Image: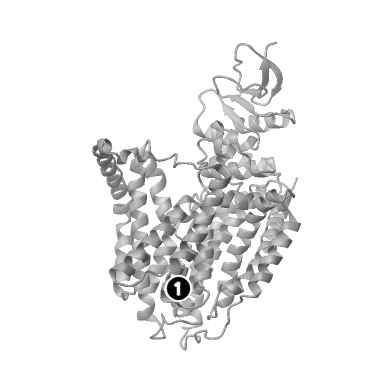
Amino acid sequence: MSDLGSSLAEVGGILVAGGVPGYLAASAFVPGGPARTVEKLAWGFSIGASLIASIVPLSFLARVPPGWLPLLILGGLVALGASRFALDRSGSPSPAPHPGPSWMVFLLLLPIVFGVSRYALIALAEPMSAFDYLGLWGLKAKTIFGAGEVPDRLFSAFTLRFSLPEYPLGLPLLYAGTAFLLGRWDDHALALLFPLFQAAALAALYAWLRRRGASRALALGAVSPFSVFYPLYANSVGTAEVPLSLGVLLFGTSLADGLDATDRGALRRLAFGAFFVVSIKDEGWFVVLAAALVVAASALMRRRRPPFSLLAAALLPGAAVRLLHVLRRGPMPFQAFDFGYLSASRLPELAGRVKEVVTIAVEESVLPAWPALLALLLVAACGRKTPSASVLFGVLALCVAAYVVLPAFSPDPVRQIRNSFERTVAALAPLLAAALALRLVPVFSWRGAALAPVD
Amino acid sequence: MPPGDSLANRISWIRDHSSQDLFARRLAGFSGVFDRRYLLFLESARRALPAAASGIAIHVPHASDAHVSLAEYHFAPIPVLVSPARVPRGWSAAVYGDWRPPGWRVISLVPGGALIGPVP
Protein backbone atom coordinates (compact mmCIF):
# COMPACT_ATOMS: atom_id res chain seq x y z
CA MET A 1 0.00 0.00 0.00
CA SER A 2 1.36 3.46 -0.94
CA ASP A 3 0.01 6.89 -0.14
CA LEU A 4 -0.45 9.46 -2.85
CA GLY A 5 2.61 11.55 -1.99
CA SER A 6 5.12 8.70 -2.18
CA SER A 7 3.50 7.30 -5.34
CA LEU A 8 3.71 10.70 -7.03
CA ALA A 9 7.36 10.99 -6.00
CA GLU A 10 8.08 7.57 -7.51
CA VAL A 11 6.30 8.35 -10.80
CA GLY A 12 8.00 11.76 -10.89
CA GLY A 13 11.36 10.00 -10.49
CA ILE A 14 10.52 7.62 -13.34
CA LEU A 15 9.60 10.51 -15.63
CA VAL A 16 12.84 12.30 -14.72
CA ALA A 17 14.77 9.08 -15.45
CA GLY A 18 13.17 8.95 -18.89
CA GLY A 19 13.48 12.70 -19.36
CA VAL A 20 17.25 12.89 -18.75
CA PRO A 21 18.21 10.87 -21.86
CA GLY A 22 15.38 12.68 -23.63
CA TYR A 23 16.89 16.04 -22.70
CA LEU A 24 20.33 14.93 -23.86
CA ALA A 25 18.86 13.63 -27.11
CA ALA A 26 17.05 16.94 -27.63
CA SER A 27 20.43 18.49 -28.50
CA ALA A 28 20.11 16.81 -31.88
CA PHE A 29 16.70 18.36 -32.46
CA VAL A 30 16.66 21.85 -30.92
CA PRO A 31 18.79 24.62 -32.44
CA GLY A 32 20.14 27.70 -30.73
CA GLY A 33 17.65 30.28 -29.54
CA PRO A 34 16.91 32.67 -26.69
CA ALA A 35 14.91 29.97 -24.85
CA ARG A 36 16.92 26.92 -25.91
CA THR A 37 16.88 25.29 -22.46
CA VAL A 38 13.10 25.67 -22.20
CA GLU A 39 12.67 24.19 -25.69
CA LYS A 40 15.04 21.32 -24.86
CA LEU A 41 13.06 20.59 -21.69
CA ALA A 42 9.82 20.37 -23.67
CA TRP A 43 11.31 18.16 -26.39
CA GLY A 44 13.25 16.19 -23.78
CA PHE A 45 10.04 15.36 -21.91
CA SER A 46 8.38 14.25 -25.15
CA ILE A 47 11.37 12.11 -26.18
CA GLY A 48 11.59 10.70 -22.64
CA ALA A 49 7.89 9.75 -22.65
CA SER A 50 8.47 8.02 -26.00
CA LEU A 51 11.43 6.12 -24.54
CA ILE A 52 9.35 4.89 -21.58
CA ALA A 53 6.59 3.76 -23.95
CA SER A 54 9.08 2.13 -26.34
CA ILE A 55 10.72 -0.12 -23.75
CA VAL A 56 7.48 -2.10 -23.48
CA PRO A 57 7.24 -3.54 -27.04
CA LEU A 58 11.03 -3.70 -27.40
CA SER A 59 11.34 -5.69 -24.14
CA PHE A 60 8.54 -8.01 -25.22
CA LEU A 61 10.35 -8.56 -28.53
CA ALA A 62 13.61 -9.28 -26.69
CA ARG A 63 11.70 -11.55 -24.28
CA VAL A 64 12.88 -9.63 -21.20
CA PRO A 65 10.63 -7.94 -18.66
CA PRO A 66 10.18 -4.20 -19.29
CA GLY A 67 12.04 -2.34 -16.56
CA TRP A 68 15.01 -0.24 -15.61
CA LEU A 69 17.68 -2.13 -17.56
CA PRO A 70 15.87 -1.75 -20.91
CA LEU A 71 15.30 1.95 -20.14
CA LEU A 72 18.97 2.40 -19.26
CA ILE A 73 20.11 0.67 -22.45
CA LEU A 74 17.62 2.39 -24.76
CA GLY A 75 18.07 5.81 -23.12
CA GLY A 76 21.85 5.46 -23.25
CA LEU A 77 21.82 4.46 -26.91
CA VAL A 78 19.50 7.32 -27.87
CA ALA A 79 21.47 9.93 -25.90
CA LEU A 80 24.81 8.69 -27.27
CA GLY A 81 23.51 8.52 -30.82
CA ALA A 82 21.99 11.99 -30.57
CA SER A 83 25.23 13.46 -29.20
CA ARG A 84 26.91 12.65 -32.54
CA PHE A 85 24.31 14.77 -34.32
CA ALA A 86 24.02 17.62 -31.82
CA LEU A 87 23.05 20.89 -33.48
CA ASP A 88 25.37 23.87 -33.42
CA ARG A 89 24.22 26.65 -31.10
CA SER A 90 25.82 29.33 -33.24
CA GLY A 91 23.57 31.49 -35.34
CA SER A 92 21.08 31.95 -32.52
CA PRO A 93 19.18 35.21 -32.74
CA SER A 94 20.30 37.74 -30.20
CA PRO A 95 17.94 38.44 -27.30
CA ALA A 96 15.35 41.14 -27.84
CA PRO A 97 16.79 44.57 -27.05
CA HIS A 98 13.52 45.56 -25.36
CA PRO A 99 12.29 42.47 -23.53
CA GLY A 100 9.65 44.51 -21.68
CA PRO A 101 9.56 45.49 -18.00
CA SER A 102 9.92 42.64 -15.53
CA TRP A 103 6.56 43.47 -13.90
CA MET A 104 4.87 42.83 -17.26
CA VAL A 105 6.61 39.47 -17.61
CA PHE A 106 5.54 38.63 -14.04
CA LEU A 107 1.94 39.61 -14.81
CA LEU A 108 1.92 37.47 -17.96
CA LEU A 109 3.37 34.52 -16.06
CA LEU A 110 0.59 34.60 -13.45
CA PRO A 111 -2.21 33.13 -15.62
CA ILE A 112 0.19 30.46 -16.91
CA VAL A 113 1.13 29.41 -13.38
CA PHE A 114 -2.56 29.45 -12.48
CA GLY A 115 -3.49 27.36 -15.55
CA VAL A 116 -0.87 24.69 -14.91
CA SER A 117 -1.62 24.57 -11.15
CA ARG A 118 -5.33 24.33 -11.82
CA TYR A 119 -4.90 21.46 -14.27
CA ALA A 120 -2.52 19.70 -11.84
CA LEU A 121 -5.20 19.91 -9.13
CA ILE A 122 -7.82 18.56 -11.54
CA ALA A 123 -5.50 15.73 -12.61
CA LEU A 124 -4.28 14.73 -9.18
CA ALA A 125 -7.49 15.08 -7.18
CA GLU A 126 -8.49 11.42 -7.67
CA PRO A 127 -7.58 8.26 -9.61
CA MET A 128 -8.20 8.74 -13.34
CA SER A 129 -11.88 8.10 -14.03
CA ALA A 130 -12.83 9.71 -17.38
CA PHE A 131 -15.11 7.41 -19.37
CA ASP A 132 -12.65 7.13 -22.27
CA TYR A 133 -9.83 6.42 -19.85
CA LEU A 134 -11.68 3.52 -18.23
CA GLY A 135 -13.11 2.11 -21.45
CA LEU A 136 -10.19 2.67 -23.79
CA TRP A 137 -6.75 4.06 -22.87
CA GLY A 138 -6.51 2.79 -19.30
CA LEU A 139 -8.16 -0.53 -20.12
CA LYS A 140 -5.59 -1.30 -22.84
CA ALA A 141 -2.68 -0.17 -20.67
CA LYS A 142 -3.81 -2.13 -17.60
CA THR A 143 -4.32 -5.21 -19.81
CA ILE A 144 -0.81 -4.92 -21.28
CA PHE A 145 0.71 -4.40 -17.83
CA GLY A 146 -1.28 -7.17 -16.15
CA ALA A 147 -0.81 -9.69 -18.96
CA GLY A 148 2.91 -8.92 -19.38
CA GLU A 149 2.41 -8.83 -23.16
CA VAL A 150 0.37 -7.12 -25.85
CA PRO A 151 -2.32 -9.81 -26.00
CA ASP A 152 -4.10 -10.65 -29.25
CA ARG A 153 -7.44 -10.07 -27.61
CA LEU A 154 -6.77 -6.32 -27.45
CA PHE A 155 -7.50 -6.38 -31.17
CA SER A 156 -9.96 -9.21 -31.57
CA ALA A 157 -11.86 -9.92 -28.36
CA PHE A 158 -15.61 -9.45 -28.41
CA THR A 159 -15.37 -8.07 -24.86
CA LEU A 160 -13.08 -5.24 -26.03
CA ARG A 161 -14.99 -4.32 -29.20
CA PHE A 162 -15.87 -0.86 -27.84
CA SER A 163 -12.26 0.00 -26.94
CA LEU A 164 -11.41 1.11 -30.51
CA PRO A 165 -8.94 -1.74 -31.19
CA GLU A 166 -7.74 -0.03 -34.38
CA TYR A 167 -6.32 2.94 -32.44
CA PRO A 168 -2.54 3.29 -31.93
CA LEU A 169 -1.04 2.12 -28.64
CA GLY A 170 1.34 4.99 -27.81
CA LEU A 171 -0.53 6.26 -24.76
CA PRO A 172 -1.36 2.78 -23.32
CA LEU A 173 2.30 1.80 -23.78
CA LEU A 174 3.38 4.94 -21.91
CA TYR A 175 1.06 4.09 -19.00
CA ALA A 176 2.19 0.45 -19.05
CA GLY A 177 5.89 1.38 -19.32
CA THR A 178 5.60 3.71 -16.32
CA ALA A 179 3.75 0.99 -14.37
CA PHE A 180 6.43 -1.60 -15.22
CA LEU A 181 9.10 0.79 -13.92
CA LEU A 182 6.99 1.52 -10.84
CA GLY A 183 6.41 -2.18 -10.24
CA ARG A 184 2.64 -1.80 -9.77
CA TRP A 185 -0.46 -0.30 -11.32
CA ASP A 186 -1.25 3.12 -9.83
CA ASP A 187 -3.83 5.00 -11.88
CA HIS A 188 -3.74 7.96 -9.52
CA ALA A 189 0.00 8.67 -9.63
CA LEU A 190 0.03 8.10 -13.42
CA ALA A 191 -2.14 11.21 -13.74
CA LEU A 192 1.01 13.23 -13.05
CA LEU A 193 1.71 12.81 -16.76
CA PHE A 194 -1.10 15.19 -17.65
CA PRO A 195 0.02 18.49 -16.11
CA LEU A 196 3.46 17.60 -17.48
CA PHE A 197 2.01 17.14 -20.99
CA GLN A 198 0.40 20.56 -20.59
CA ALA A 199 3.56 22.20 -19.24
CA ALA A 200 5.61 20.68 -22.08
CA ALA A 201 3.19 22.06 -24.68
CA LEU A 202 3.27 25.54 -23.13
CA ALA A 203 7.08 25.46 -22.88
CA ALA A 204 7.44 24.23 -26.47
CA LEU A 205 5.12 26.96 -27.77
CA TYR A 206 6.87 29.70 -25.75
CA ALA A 207 10.37 28.66 -26.78
CA TRP A 208 9.38 28.23 -30.44
CA LEU A 209 7.85 31.71 -30.48
CA ARG A 210 11.01 33.14 -28.93
CA ARG A 211 13.17 31.32 -31.48
CA ARG A 212 11.00 32.65 -34.28
CA GLY A 213 11.53 36.22 -33.14
CA ALA A 214 8.79 36.99 -30.61
CA SER A 215 9.71 39.11 -27.60
CA ARG A 216 9.37 37.50 -24.17
CA ALA A 217 6.19 39.46 -23.45
CA LEU A 218 4.61 38.55 -26.80
CA ALA A 219 5.49 34.86 -26.38
CA LEU A 220 4.08 34.76 -22.83
CA GLY A 221 1.01 36.64 -24.00
CA ALA A 222 0.39 33.99 -26.69
CA VAL A 223 0.91 31.11 -24.25
CA SER A 224 -1.35 32.54 -21.50
CA PRO A 225 -4.77 31.88 -23.08
CA PHE A 226 -3.66 28.41 -24.17
CA SER A 227 -2.77 27.55 -20.53
CA VAL A 228 -6.35 28.08 -19.35
CA PHE A 229 -8.10 26.71 -22.46
CA TYR A 230 -11.08 25.07 -20.77
CA PRO A 231 -12.33 22.89 -23.69
CA LEU A 232 -8.96 21.12 -23.77
CA TYR A 233 -8.21 20.85 -20.06
CA ALA A 234 -11.62 19.90 -18.67
CA ASN A 235 -12.49 16.20 -18.35
CA SER A 236 -9.38 15.21 -20.29
CA VAL A 237 -7.29 13.53 -17.59
CA GLY A 238 -6.33 10.05 -18.76
CA THR A 239 -7.64 10.51 -22.31
CA ALA A 240 -5.65 11.22 -25.48
CA GLU A 241 -6.58 14.85 -26.20
CA VAL A 242 -3.89 16.57 -24.09
CA PRO A 243 -0.96 14.41 -25.29
CA LEU A 244 -2.39 14.72 -28.80
CA SER A 245 -2.35 18.52 -28.49
CA LEU A 246 1.34 18.36 -27.49
CA GLY A 247 2.03 16.17 -30.52
CA VAL A 248 0.07 18.47 -32.83
CA LEU A 249 2.12 21.42 -31.54
CA LEU A 250 5.48 19.67 -31.99
CA PHE A 251 4.49 18.56 -35.48
CA GLY A 252 2.93 21.89 -36.54
CA THR A 253 5.77 24.13 -35.34
CA SER A 254 8.33 21.79 -36.93
CA LEU A 255 6.35 21.82 -40.17
CA ALA A 256 6.50 25.63 -40.19
CA ASP A 257 10.24 25.53 -39.42
CA GLY A 258 10.74 23.00 -42.21
CA LEU A 259 8.81 25.10 -44.71
CA ASP A 260 10.80 28.20 -43.76
CA ALA A 261 14.08 26.22 -43.60
CA THR A 262 14.94 27.78 -40.25
CA ASP A 263 17.69 25.35 -39.26
CA ARG A 264 19.26 21.95 -39.88
CA GLY A 265 17.20 20.30 -37.15
CA ALA A 266 13.78 21.26 -38.54
CA LEU A 267 13.26 18.04 -40.49
CA ARG A 268 14.46 15.93 -37.54
CA ARG A 269 11.91 17.66 -35.32
CA LEU A 270 9.25 17.17 -37.98
CA ALA A 271 10.03 13.44 -38.14
CA PHE A 272 9.85 13.07 -34.35
CA GLY A 273 6.69 15.21 -34.18
CA ALA A 274 5.04 12.96 -36.78
CA PHE A 275 6.13 9.82 -34.89
CA PHE A 276 4.77 11.23 -31.62
CA VAL A 277 1.42 12.50 -32.91
CA VAL A 278 0.66 9.37 -34.98
CA SER A 279 1.48 7.14 -31.97
CA ILE A 280 -1.20 8.83 -29.86
CA LYS A 281 -4.38 8.74 -31.90
CA ASP A 282 -5.75 8.18 -35.40
CA GLU A 283 -6.47 11.90 -35.53
CA GLY A 284 -2.69 12.43 -35.42
CA TRP A 285 -2.26 10.47 -38.64
CA PHE A 286 -5.01 12.58 -40.17
CA VAL A 287 -3.13 15.78 -39.20
CA VAL A 288 0.01 14.42 -40.87
CA LEU A 289 -1.86 13.42 -44.04
CA ALA A 290 -3.64 16.78 -44.17
CA ALA A 291 -0.30 18.57 -43.79
CA ALA A 292 1.28 16.56 -46.61
CA LEU A 293 -1.69 17.28 -48.85
CA VAL A 294 -1.68 21.03 -48.14
CA VAL A 295 2.12 21.34 -48.53
CA ALA A 296 2.10 19.46 -51.84
CA ALA A 297 -0.92 21.39 -53.17
CA SER A 298 0.56 24.71 -52.06
CA ALA A 299 3.83 23.99 -53.90
CA LEU A 300 2.05 22.87 -57.07
CA MET A 301 -0.23 25.92 -57.06
CA ARG A 302 2.86 28.13 -56.95
CA ARG A 303 4.38 26.06 -59.79
CA ARG A 304 7.17 24.86 -57.55
CA ARG A 305 8.61 21.42 -56.95
CA PRO A 306 7.02 19.86 -53.84
CA PRO A 307 9.51 19.71 -50.92
CA PHE A 308 10.07 15.95 -51.09
CA SER A 309 12.50 15.75 -48.15
CA LEU A 310 10.01 17.60 -45.94
CA LEU A 311 7.14 15.37 -47.11
CA ALA A 312 9.25 12.29 -46.42
CA ALA A 313 10.17 13.54 -42.93
CA ALA A 314 6.46 14.07 -42.20
CA LEU A 315 5.03 10.91 -43.77
CA LEU A 316 7.60 8.15 -43.25
CA PRO A 317 7.69 8.08 -39.41
CA GLY A 318 3.90 8.15 -39.27
CA ALA A 319 3.64 5.43 -41.90
CA ALA A 320 6.18 3.35 -39.95
CA VAL A 321 4.08 3.65 -36.77
CA ARG A 322 0.98 2.61 -38.71
CA LEU A 323 2.83 -0.30 -40.33
CA LEU A 324 4.09 -1.59 -36.97
CA HIS A 325 0.53 -1.62 -35.68
CA VAL A 326 -0.75 -3.40 -38.78
CA LEU A 327 2.02 -6.00 -38.48
CA ARG A 328 1.04 -6.67 -34.87
CA ARG A 329 -2.73 -6.65 -35.14
CA GLY A 330 -3.43 -7.18 -38.83
CA PRO A 331 -5.35 -4.78 -41.05
CA MET A 332 -8.35 -3.34 -39.31
CA PRO A 333 -11.00 -1.06 -40.79
CA PHE A 334 -12.30 2.01 -38.96
CA GLN A 335 -14.98 0.34 -36.91
CA ALA A 336 -16.53 3.62 -35.88
CA PHE A 337 -17.32 4.69 -39.47
CA ASP A 338 -19.20 3.10 -42.35
CA PHE A 339 -17.77 4.45 -45.60
CA GLY A 340 -20.36 2.47 -47.52
CA TYR A 341 -22.34 5.73 -47.43
CA LEU A 342 -20.08 6.92 -50.26
CA SER A 343 -21.74 4.48 -52.66
CA ALA A 344 -24.04 6.16 -55.21
CA SER A 345 -27.21 4.60 -53.82
CA ARG A 346 -26.57 5.91 -50.30
CA LEU A 347 -25.33 9.42 -51.17
CA PRO A 348 -28.74 11.05 -50.57
CA GLU A 349 -28.84 9.51 -47.09
CA LEU A 350 -25.27 10.72 -46.50
CA ALA A 351 -26.22 14.25 -47.55
CA GLY A 352 -28.99 14.29 -44.93
CA ARG A 353 -26.58 13.03 -42.28
CA VAL A 354 -23.95 15.64 -43.19
CA LYS A 355 -26.57 18.40 -42.99
CA GLU A 356 -27.61 17.14 -39.57
CA VAL A 357 -24.09 17.05 -38.08
CA VAL A 358 -23.09 20.39 -39.62
CA THR A 359 -26.21 22.00 -38.13
CA ILE A 360 -25.41 20.57 -34.69
CA ALA A 361 -21.76 21.66 -34.87
CA VAL A 362 -22.73 25.20 -35.89
CA GLU A 363 -25.62 25.61 -33.44
CA GLU A 364 -24.05 23.95 -30.39
CA SER A 365 -20.33 24.68 -30.80
CA VAL A 366 -19.59 27.46 -33.29
CA LEU A 367 -22.35 30.00 -32.53
CA PRO A 368 -21.91 29.88 -28.72
CA ALA A 369 -18.19 30.58 -29.24
CA TRP A 370 -18.66 33.46 -31.71
CA PRO A 371 -17.06 36.19 -29.55
CA ALA A 372 -13.88 34.16 -29.15
CA LEU A 373 -13.86 33.20 -32.83
CA LEU A 374 -14.37 36.83 -33.83
CA ALA A 375 -11.49 37.86 -31.59
CA LEU A 376 -9.28 35.25 -33.23
CA LEU A 377 -10.22 36.53 -36.69
CA LEU A 378 -9.35 40.08 -35.63
CA VAL A 379 -6.00 38.91 -34.25
CA ALA A 380 -5.28 37.06 -37.48
CA ALA A 381 -6.22 40.16 -39.47
CA CYS A 382 -3.61 42.17 -37.53
CA GLY A 383 -0.86 39.90 -38.84
CA ARG A 384 0.85 39.42 -42.17
CA LYS A 385 0.37 36.60 -44.63
CA THR A 386 3.27 34.14 -44.62
CA PRO A 387 3.50 30.86 -46.59
CA SER A 388 4.05 28.67 -43.53
CA ALA A 389 1.13 30.29 -41.65
CA SER A 390 -1.11 29.70 -44.67
CA VAL A 391 -0.13 26.02 -44.70
CA LEU A 392 -0.92 25.64 -40.99
CA PHE A 393 -4.29 27.35 -41.49
CA GLY A 394 -4.93 24.99 -44.41
CA VAL A 395 -4.16 21.96 -42.21
CA LEU A 396 -6.46 23.35 -39.52
CA ALA A 397 -9.28 23.91 -42.00
CA LEU A 398 -8.98 20.38 -43.40
CA CYS A 399 -8.94 18.84 -39.91
CA VAL A 400 -11.93 20.84 -38.66
CA ALA A 401 -13.89 20.04 -41.82
CA ALA A 402 -13.12 16.34 -41.36
CA TYR A 403 -14.11 16.41 -37.69
CA VAL A 404 -17.45 17.91 -38.68
CA VAL A 405 -18.18 15.54 -41.56
CA LEU A 406 -16.76 12.22 -40.31
CA PRO A 407 -19.47 11.71 -37.64
CA ALA A 408 -21.96 11.52 -40.54
CA PHE A 409 -20.46 8.10 -41.33
CA SER A 410 -20.98 6.73 -37.80
CA PRO A 411 -23.95 4.61 -36.72
CA ASP A 412 -25.20 7.43 -34.48
CA PRO A 413 -24.12 10.74 -36.07
CA VAL A 414 -25.86 12.98 -33.52
CA ARG A 415 -24.24 11.27 -30.56
CA GLN A 416 -20.86 11.13 -32.32
CA ILE A 417 -20.71 14.84 -33.23
CA ARG A 418 -21.81 15.87 -29.73
CA ASN A 419 -19.34 13.49 -28.11
CA SER A 420 -16.28 14.15 -30.24
CA PHE A 421 -16.35 17.46 -32.14
CA GLU A 422 -15.40 19.96 -29.45
CA ARG A 423 -12.70 17.90 -27.80
CA THR A 424 -11.02 16.85 -31.06
CA VAL A 425 -11.04 20.43 -32.32
CA ALA A 426 -9.76 21.62 -28.92
CA ALA A 427 -6.67 19.43 -29.38
CA LEU A 428 -5.85 21.52 -32.46
CA ALA A 429 -5.64 24.71 -30.37
CA PRO A 430 -1.81 24.75 -30.30
CA LEU A 431 -1.72 24.50 -34.08
CA LEU A 432 -3.98 27.57 -34.24
CA ALA A 433 -1.72 29.40 -31.76
CA ALA A 434 1.33 28.59 -33.90
CA ALA A 435 -0.42 29.67 -37.12
CA LEU A 436 -1.56 32.96 -35.57
CA ALA A 437 1.92 33.59 -34.20
CA LEU A 438 3.46 33.08 -37.63
CA ARG A 439 1.19 35.86 -38.91
CA LEU A 440 1.87 38.15 -35.94
CA VAL A 441 5.60 37.72 -35.42
CA PRO A 442 6.63 39.66 -38.56
CA VAL A 443 4.52 42.58 -37.30
CA PHE A 444 5.52 42.56 -33.64
CA SER A 445 9.03 41.12 -33.91
CA TRP A 446 12.06 43.13 -32.87
CA ARG A 447 13.79 41.76 -35.97
CA GLY A 448 12.48 42.51 -39.41
CA ALA A 449 13.82 39.15 -40.59
CA ALA A 450 12.08 37.05 -37.99
CA LEU A 451 11.51 34.22 -40.44
CA ALA A 452 15.14 34.01 -41.51
CA PRO A 453 17.08 30.81 -40.85
CA VAL A 454 18.78 30.80 -37.47
CA ASP A 455 21.25 27.93 -37.93
CA MET B 1 -17.84 12.93 -1.33
CA PRO B 2 -15.98 13.27 -4.66
CA PRO B 3 -13.47 16.11 -5.09
CA GLY B 4 -16.03 18.44 -6.70
CA ASP B 5 -15.41 21.15 -9.25
CA SER B 6 -13.98 23.98 -7.19
CA LEU B 7 -10.24 24.15 -6.64
CA ALA B 8 -10.71 24.58 -2.89
CA ASN B 9 -12.70 21.33 -2.78
CA ARG B 10 -10.01 19.53 -4.73
CA ILE B 11 -7.28 20.75 -2.40
CA SER B 12 -9.20 19.66 0.69
CA TRP B 13 -10.06 16.33 -1.00
CA ILE B 14 -6.38 15.64 -1.68
CA ARG B 15 -5.49 16.64 1.90
CA ASP B 16 -8.15 14.34 3.36
CA HIS B 17 -7.55 11.29 1.17
CA SER B 18 -3.88 11.32 0.15
CA SER B 19 -2.86 8.95 2.94
CA GLN B 20 -5.47 6.34 1.97
CA ASP B 21 -4.72 3.37 -0.26
CA LEU B 22 -5.45 3.51 -3.97
CA PHE B 23 -8.78 1.68 -3.91
CA ALA B 24 -10.08 3.81 -1.03
CA ARG B 25 -9.23 6.92 -3.07
CA ARG B 26 -11.06 5.53 -6.12
CA LEU B 27 -14.04 4.66 -3.97
CA ALA B 28 -14.11 8.20 -2.60
CA GLY B 29 -13.84 9.74 -6.09
CA PHE B 30 -16.24 10.04 -9.02
CA SER B 31 -16.04 6.32 -9.85
CA GLY B 32 -17.56 5.68 -6.43
CA VAL B 33 -20.24 8.33 -6.83
CA PHE B 34 -21.57 6.57 -9.92
CA ASP B 35 -22.42 3.44 -7.86
CA ARG B 36 -20.37 2.98 -4.71
CA ARG B 37 -21.89 -0.42 -3.89
CA TYR B 38 -21.07 -1.69 -7.41
CA LEU B 39 -17.44 -0.58 -7.11
CA LEU B 40 -17.16 -2.31 -3.73
CA PHE B 41 -18.69 -5.43 -5.26
CA LEU B 42 -16.19 -5.39 -8.17
CA GLU B 43 -13.21 -5.09 -5.84
CA SER B 44 -14.50 -7.80 -3.50
CA ALA B 45 -15.19 -10.15 -6.42
CA ARG B 46 -11.75 -9.45 -7.87
CA ARG B 47 -10.08 -10.35 -4.58
CA ALA B 48 -12.15 -13.52 -4.29
CA LEU B 49 -11.38 -14.72 -7.83
CA PRO B 50 -9.18 -17.79 -8.23
CA ALA B 51 -5.69 -16.83 -9.43
CA ALA B 52 -6.08 -18.91 -12.59
CA ALA B 53 -9.40 -17.34 -13.66
CA SER B 54 -9.49 -17.06 -17.45
CA GLY B 55 -12.40 -14.61 -17.43
CA ILE B 56 -15.37 -13.48 -15.42
CA ALA B 57 -19.00 -13.04 -16.34
CA ILE B 58 -20.87 -10.54 -14.19
CA HIS B 59 -24.63 -10.41 -14.05
CA VAL B 60 -25.70 -6.82 -13.48
CA PRO B 61 -29.38 -5.85 -13.53
CA HIS B 62 -29.96 -2.96 -15.99
CA ALA B 63 -26.25 -2.62 -16.82
CA SER B 64 -25.28 0.75 -18.34
CA ASP B 65 -22.18 1.53 -20.43
CA ALA B 66 -20.58 2.86 -17.26
CA HIS B 67 -21.18 -0.46 -15.47
CA VAL B 68 -19.55 -2.31 -18.35
CA SER B 69 -16.48 -0.10 -18.74
CA LEU B 70 -15.87 0.09 -14.98
CA ALA B 71 -16.01 -3.72 -14.72
CA GLU B 72 -13.72 -4.25 -17.75
CA TYR B 73 -11.19 -1.77 -16.39
CA HIS B 74 -11.35 -3.00 -12.81
CA PHE B 75 -10.71 -6.65 -13.69
CA ALA B 76 -8.12 -6.04 -16.46
CA PRO B 77 -6.20 -8.00 -17.63
CA ILE B 78 -8.88 -10.62 -16.92
CA PRO B 79 -11.55 -10.53 -19.68
CA VAL B 80 -15.04 -9.52 -18.54
CA LEU B 81 -18.51 -10.06 -19.96
CA VAL B 82 -21.37 -8.16 -18.37
CA SER B 83 -24.75 -9.91 -18.29
CA PRO B 84 -23.93 -12.33 -21.15
CA ALA B 85 -26.51 -14.78 -22.46
CA ARG B 86 -24.02 -17.59 -21.88
CA VAL B 87 -20.95 -17.87 -19.66
CA PRO B 88 -17.89 -19.14 -21.60
CA ARG B 89 -16.55 -22.50 -20.44
CA GLY B 90 -13.92 -22.17 -17.73
CA TRP B 91 -14.89 -18.64 -16.76
CA SER B 92 -15.85 -17.57 -13.26
CA ALA B 93 -19.18 -15.86 -12.69
CA ALA B 94 -20.54 -13.31 -10.25
CA VAL B 95 -23.84 -11.63 -9.71
CA TYR B 96 -24.37 -8.07 -8.50
CA GLY B 97 -27.24 -7.58 -6.08
CA ASP B 98 -29.55 -10.01 -4.37
CA TRP B 99 -30.95 -11.73 -7.45
CA ARG B 100 -29.66 -15.28 -8.15
CA PRO B 101 -29.95 -16.78 -11.65
CA PRO B 102 -31.67 -20.17 -11.84
CA GLY B 103 -29.31 -23.10 -12.40
CA TRP B 104 -26.51 -21.42 -10.48
CA ARG B 105 -25.36 -21.85 -6.88
CA VAL B 106 -23.60 -19.39 -4.62
CA ILE B 107 -19.90 -20.21 -4.13
CA SER B 108 -19.20 -17.32 -1.80
CA LEU B 109 -20.92 -14.15 -0.77
CA VAL B 110 -19.07 -10.88 -1.34
CA PRO B 111 -20.17 -7.35 -0.41
CA GLY B 112 -22.84 -6.32 -2.91
CA GLY B 113 -23.30 -9.75 -4.50
CA ALA B 114 -21.90 -13.24 -4.83
CA LEU B 115 -19.52 -15.42 -6.78
CA ILE B 116 -21.60 -18.18 -8.37
CA GLY B 117 -21.07 -21.44 -10.23
CA PRO B 118 -23.31 -23.80 -12.22
CA VAL B 119 -25.33 -26.34 -10.22
CA PRO B 120 -23.55 -29.68 -10.74
Above or below residue A265? Residue A316 is above
- What is the three-letter code of the residue carrying label 1? Asp
A444 over B108 or under it: above or below: below
Q: Residue A349: x and y, percent?
A: 26, 37
Q: Quick one: quadrant of the N terminus of chain A?
A: top right
Q: What residue is rendered at 34% in x and 63% in y?
A: A394
**Residue at 65% over, 65% down:** A19
Residue B19 in percent (x, y) is at 71, 48
* Residue at 64% from the left image edge and 35% from the top image edge: B75
How many residues crowd around disc 1 within 10 Å: few (fewer than 14), some, or many (20 or more)? Answer: many
**Residue A129 seen in render:** no
Q: Chain of mark 1?
A: A
Which residue is denoted by mark 1 in the rendering? A257
**Observer-nearest of A322 and A255:** A322
Q: Nearer the viewer, residue A301 or B15?
A: A301
In which quarter of the view is residue A74 placed?
A: bottom right
Q: Nearer the viewer, residue B5 or A322?
A: A322
Which is nearer the eye, A55 or A32?
A55
- Local secondary structure at mark 1: helix
Q: Residue A251 in the image: x percent, y percent?
A: 47, 64
